Image (cartoon, rainbow, N blue to C red):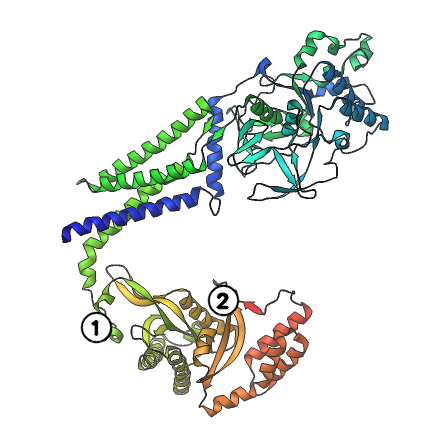
């Protein structure tokens, strides 16, 4: 029976570790609580690689969208003085008239017209009337993004009430032309709408505003959101995230992907005179050709600039892959790609979140148990790891190739990074588990019989042999740190032999005090000493014992200094820090050598308090948790509320003065009346009056150092008053 229980226990441990690893992978990859930007960018870059592998898909005449370019030739053919940007709005009115005569379904003008016509108000009226007449025109608008909420509502502000376009008032047909990049600066997503906070309404993006015209939907219609899809009428659009769809790009080459025509050719009819018409006296009138007009019938026409100086160029996911920077696309073509995706229902379909979670868990467990099974084989260690690495690499390669296959064949986007991390961590967690298990099995007997030399807890170990094992327990203790102030400068004044003799004498006396008061000596750290009370033997008044030891230490050091002074030895001064609280105490270390010690935040705080004495010119500092356990037996004075380095929670600290039964201590506390009055005023932000009390206390016979610290601080606050959120906490910037 004993033999059958162990494998079952090991199996449970392995299963638990494998599941924990899967949870860690999910936390890293699924953006549950946080997002790791490098991983997200890597996944997006791998999407770009899939576009590159698939190549361009020119649409030609089958395209539902045609582009009218505002290009250099069009500029050159607009007669002076109208050939300066912005053009007179009359040319846009002419454009709308001609395109509607040709039978277009919708027109999107990717130009934000924020100001009145520079030539004549009549031009604005002509364009306004044309928009109202046909009701199929969308003008470009802009917003400013404030933030994105998890609910899927991005909050935006409007630069002007008309979204930056004068012609919003024609029929409110505005589409937002803003584009938002991923962390790596590339545009891959298209948002159907933005949430305008001022009116608490949703505003369609440029492409979706044009689609409203194309499908005869209301001007301000925006998609519905259901679970993992948007719905434009009956068209289901897969969501990539809370607010966006992924653009399934057709190509990067503007001359091949979508049919495109020059702006000047669309307005060049028998009523419009181009520069060539004027110069050569011949009317070319390219628009009057019926065959030319057929190119626009039943189409969506997008009008936008392809002039380099307009800088309407964005980096996108698709590229030619020939050189850096060849993934740049004109903004109007970006909108065209998104619109064509919707009309053709040609979407990139994303792997569902549920399937990704299942895949991550499955692959983590699969790799963990495959690796564990292989490690049980009787093979050489390097051969085992080689087999594991080959299997892991093979699985990752299979996922990588599958992602390209499904993307090219079915426009299906599956994750690569999360499954790869699942495989890698599954392997590493299995390796770590088996390594630790092997080490424990080979060293357990030796470790159990190693000897402790610390006599302080030999009796406890005899009664409780389990304390010999590695590990610890949580206990409420008092931790004591002591260090010699200015030790480096003191040691320079002594020979090596004198220094060793003095330090041995000092540390020996201090150690005797600690042990006599029931403390456990933890370690010597140069001239510093660390000890604690309350373990391995429980001591109810451990805080008092620690503080009393500190008082005895200072008393004994005064006696030693008197003796050393006769020998020409410089005076030593010891700073002490004490804190009480829950720590981890036990045998900590390696399986070959370990030590009975304490660890935890409360240990670190005690160490910081020892160093904090320097700030206030004190010798003994305790925390509030220690103070509340000893204040009925020992005089203390409040020093400050501080936040020590490496700790966010503030702590009220106190200076140890002496036993309540000591008349000198009582006399000293009485002499600090002005200090306590100054501290009271300081907390009330009455810094002027507090300064006088602190200066009085410092200038008295006491020469009180903390009073000097507060006097200087109050003077600073008088000249630099703290904000309303001042809480009186002083942050220590050094250890």
Image coordinates for residue 218, horizontal then vertical, percent: 68, 29
Question: Can residue 411 be seen?
Answer: yes
9 up-or-down from 378: above or below: below
Residue 463 - label: 1
The quarter holding residue 364 reads top left
- Is residue 225 or residue 705 the one in the foreground? 225
Is the residue marked by circle 2 packed among few (<14), some (14-19), or many (20+) residues within 10 Å?
many
- Is residue 247 or residue 230 the one in the foreground? 230
* Drawn side of residue 675 relative to residue 297, left or right: left
* Drawn side of residue 595 relative to residue 344, left or right: left
The quarter holding residue 344 reads top right
Image coordinates for residue 121, horizontal then vertical, percent: 85, 28
433 up-or-down from 506: above or below: above
Residue lying furthest bottom: 663
Residue depicted at x 65% and y 34%: 178
Residue 237 - label: none
The quarter holding residue 202 reads top right
* Residues at marks 2 and 1, CA–CA distance in whole angstroms: 40 Å
Secondary structure state at the residue bearing disc 1: helix
Q: Which tag is nearer the camera, tag 2 or tag 1?
A: 1
Residue depicted at x 63% and y 33%: 222
Image coordinates for residue 313, horizontal then vertical, percent: 63, 29
Q: Name the residue under label 2.
A: 644
Q: Earlier along the polypeptide chain: callout 2 or callout 1?
A: 1
Secondary structure state at the residue bearing disc 2: loop
């Amino acid at each position: 029976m004993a033999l059958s229980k162990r494998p079952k226990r090991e199996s449970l441990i392995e299963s638990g570790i494998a599941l924990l690893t899967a949870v860690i992978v999910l936390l890293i990859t699924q953006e549950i609580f946080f997002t790791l930007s490098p991983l997200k960018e890597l996944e997006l870059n791998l999407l770009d690689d899939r576009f590159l592998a698939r190549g361009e898909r020119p649409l030609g005449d089958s395209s539902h969208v045609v582009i009218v370019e505002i290009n250099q030739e069009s500029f050159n053919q607009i007669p002076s003085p109208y050939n300066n940007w912005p053009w007179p709005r009359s040319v846009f009115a002419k454009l709308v008239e001609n395109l509607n005569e040709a039978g277009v379904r919708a027109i999107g003008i990717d130009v934000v017209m924020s100001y009145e016509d520079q030539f004549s108000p009549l031009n604005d009226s002509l364009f306004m009337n044309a928009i109202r007449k046909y009701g199929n025109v969308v003008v470009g608008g802009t917003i400013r993004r404030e933030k994105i909420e998890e609910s899927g509502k991005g909050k935006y502000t409007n630069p002007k009430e008309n979204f930056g376009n004068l012609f919003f008032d024609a029929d409110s047909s505005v589409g937002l032309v803003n584009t938002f990049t991923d962390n790596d600066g590339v545009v891959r997503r298209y948002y159907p709408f933005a949430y305008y906070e001022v009116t608490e309404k949703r505003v369609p993006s440029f492409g979706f505003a044009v689609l409203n015209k194309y499908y005869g939907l209301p001007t301000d219609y925006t998609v519905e959101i259901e679970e993992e899809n948007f719905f434009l009428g009956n068209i289901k659009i897969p969501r990539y995230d809370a607010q966006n769809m992924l653009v399934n790009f057709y190509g990067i080459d503007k001359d091949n992907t979508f049919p495109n025509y020059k702006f000047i050719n669309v307005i060049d009819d028998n009523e419009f005179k181009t520069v060539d018409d004027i110069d050569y006296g011949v009317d070319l009138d390219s628009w009057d050709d019926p065959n030319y007009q057929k190119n626009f019938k039943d189409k969506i026409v997008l009008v936008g600039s392809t002039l380099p100086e307009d800088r309407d160029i964005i980096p996108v996911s698709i590229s030619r892959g020939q050189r850096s920077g060849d993934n740049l696309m004109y903004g109007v073509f970006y909108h065209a790609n998104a619109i064509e995706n919707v009309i053709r229902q040609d979407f990139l379909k994303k792997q569902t979140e549920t399937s990704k979670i299942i895949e991550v868990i499955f692959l983590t467990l699969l790799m963990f148990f495959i690796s564990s099974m292989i490690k049980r084989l009787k093979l050489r260690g390097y051969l085992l790891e080689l087999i594991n690495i080959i299997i892991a690499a093979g699985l990752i390669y299979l996922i990588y190739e599958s992602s390209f296959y499904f993307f090219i064949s079915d426009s299906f986007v599956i994750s690569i990074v999360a499954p790869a991390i699942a495989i890698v961590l599954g392997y590493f967690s299995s390796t770590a588990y088996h390594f630790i298990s092997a080490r424990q099995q080979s060293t357990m007997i030796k470790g159990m019989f190693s000897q402790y030399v610390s006599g302080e807890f030999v009796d406890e170990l005899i009664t409780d042999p389990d304390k010999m094992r590695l590990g610890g327990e949580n206990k409420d203790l008092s931790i004591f740190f002591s260090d010699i102030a200015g030790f480096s400068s003191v040691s320079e004044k002594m020979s090596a032999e004198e220094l060793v003799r003095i330090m041995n004498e000092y540390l020996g006396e201090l150690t005797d005090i600690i042990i006599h008061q029931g403390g456990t000596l933890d370690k010597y750290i140069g001239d510093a000493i660390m000890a604690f009370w309350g373990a391995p033997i429980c001591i109810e008044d451990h805080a008092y014992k620690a503080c009393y030891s500190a008082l005895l230490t200072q008393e004994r050091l005064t006696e030693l200094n008197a003796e050393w002074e006769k020998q020409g030895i410089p005076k030593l001064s010891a700073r002490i820090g004490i804190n009480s609280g829950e720590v981890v105490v036990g045998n900590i270390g390696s399986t070959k050598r370990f030590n009975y010690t304490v660890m935890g935040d409360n240990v670190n705080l005690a160490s910081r308090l020892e160093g904090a004495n320097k700030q206030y010119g004190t010798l003994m500092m305790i925390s509030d948790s220690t103070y509340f356990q000893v204040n009925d037996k020992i005089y203390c004075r409040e020093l400050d509320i501080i936040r020590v380095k490496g700790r966010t929670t503030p702590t009220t600290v106190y200076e140890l003065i002496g036993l309540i039964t000591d008349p000198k201590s009582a006399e000293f506390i009485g002499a600090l009346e002005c200090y306590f009055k100054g501290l009271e005023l300081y907390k009330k932000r009455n810094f002027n009056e507090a300064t006088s009390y602190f200066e009085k206390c410092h200038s008295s016979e006491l020469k009180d150092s903390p009073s000097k610290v507060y006097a200087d601080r109050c003077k600073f606050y008088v000249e630099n008053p703290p904000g309303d959120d001042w809480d009186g906490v002083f942050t220590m910037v050094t250890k």
